[in-house]
Amino acid sequence: MAAARGKFITFEGIDGAGKTTHLAWFGERLAQKLAPLGAQLLTTREPGGTPLGETLRDILLHQREHMHLETEALLMFAARREHLAQVIEPALARGDWVLCDRFTDATFAYQGGGRGLAHERLETLERWVQRGLQPELTVLFDVTPQTASARRGAVRDPDRFERETEAFFERTRNEYLRRAQEAPQRFAIIDAAGSIEQVRAQLAAQLDAL
């Protein structure tokens, strides 16, 4: 008898929203819930998740020379196709669950909302690369760009995207919220402006629902 197909969960939000802070915590508790069912949890990230994807990630985040917007989007989807083929799709097929730090919603938010690439081009790439695959649940960590900026500045040196303007992150956030409004059955919006304990209480409710 074939194993039941696994489920695909993604974490999203603008840089500084706190999603990566909570990813390991959420993953540990989800893995505990899956263990009695005989399923495992795979945690991964985008861009990245494969050796080629990690190389592309380094280019996308740290390339010093100017990169054409369409080139940036194509590299994102190139890394994603490799990630899907080598990691995500095989895991789901064998019945494992996948928790991914960013996926295509980030591309629509950053390259579409933030940088202004036409949605039609992103939608074409999405259909080609994903072949209908979408997460069962997308957890969106929502904060204002001002809050996110203060958090980023306190913890790390900025990459290409983190150096963008407040207006860029406002557009990025708005695109995330637009995507969530279009697919409310898939998105769970987390108010990420509060304390770690307050955010994890909201995440615990999502775990219970799963």
Image (cartoon, rainbow, N blue to C red):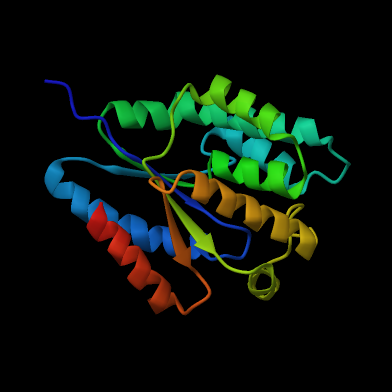
Where 157 sits versus 127, above or below? below
Residue at x 64% of width, y 74% of height:
147
Measured from the top left, where is residue 28 in percent x and y?
31, 58
Horizontally, residue 189 falls left or right of residue 6, namely: right
Q: Quadrant of the N terminus?
A: top left
Residue at x 12% of width, y 48% of height:
36
Q: Nearer the viewer, residue 198 or 94?
A: 198
Q: Nearer the viewer, residue 96 or 206?
A: 206
For this orientation, the residue located farthest to the front is 182
Residue at x 56% of width, y 31% of height:
80
Q: Nearer the viewer, residue 122 or 158?
A: 122
Using the rendered view, name the quadrant where residue 127 is placed: top right
Measured from the top left, where is residue 108 in percent x and y?
63, 41
Horizontally, residue 178 falls left or right of residue 26, namely: right
**Numbered circles on residues, count:** 0
Measured from the top left, where is residue 175 in percent x and y?
63, 50
Using the rendered view, name the quadrant where residue 128 is placed: top right
Residue at x 23% of width, y 59% of height:
208
Measured from the top left, where is residue 133 in percent x and y?
43, 29
